Amino acid sequence: MASNILVKDLMSTNVHVFRNESTAQEIVSTMSKYNVDYVIVVQSAKPTGIITMRDVIVRMVEQGLDPKVVIARAIYTNPLVTIEENATVEEAAKLMKDWKIKHLPVTRDGRITGMITYLDIAFAVPELLPEMKELYRPSK
């Protein structure tokens, strides 16, 4: 069944995008305002990284850095793993499991069109739940 479901059928299209030079303060304000736990960073309309709340905590807050001067490029995760929107959910689940990531940016012709998360897959395709559960377990 999962082989018949495409990533574009499950992805969220409401993705917040920032430039490499955007400040962490701008990013965190947007994350808070829209209650999202990730944003995508782009340069010349091409995705270059992702910033999750964990990135903000580990790379900025724990280091005691000032969010007014820290820029996106300093705290994002890179390389960015993406998937084409016409890929299957099964392919997305495998990619997420292999890379141990919970958020997978979706692209068309190299440009961001959406985001699919491990929860999107787990709820929509229960037979893939065992693979998605591995992403939920805390690391040792």
Image (tube, rainbow, N blue to C red):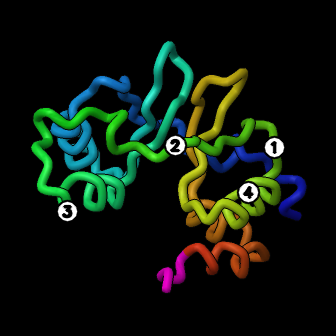
Q: Which residue is drawn at 61% across and 65% down?
A: 100
**Stretch of the chain drawn in magenta:** 136-140
Residue 114 occupies which quadrant of the picture? Answer: top right
Residue annotated with mark 2: 78
Q: In this view, does 133 lie above or below 41?
A: below
Q: Is residue 111 above or below residue 35?
A: above
Between marks 1 and 4 in the image, the one whose residue lies nearer the viewer: 4
Q: Residue at x 29, y 61 (%)?
A: 58
Q: Tell me how far mark 4 sits from mark 2, CA to CA.
A: 15 Å
Residue annotated with mark 3: 62
> Which disc, if any, is residue 95?
4
Q: Which of marks 1 and 4 is nearer the N terminus?
A: 1
Between marks 4 and 2 in the image, the one whose residue lies nearer the viewer: 2
Query: Within 10 Å of the Cα at label 1, are there few (<14), some (14-19), or many (20+) other Cα atoms?
Result: some
Quadrant in which the N terminus appears: bottom right
Q: Give the residue type at disc 2.
A: Asn
Whether residue 112 sits left or right of residue 59 in the image: it is: right
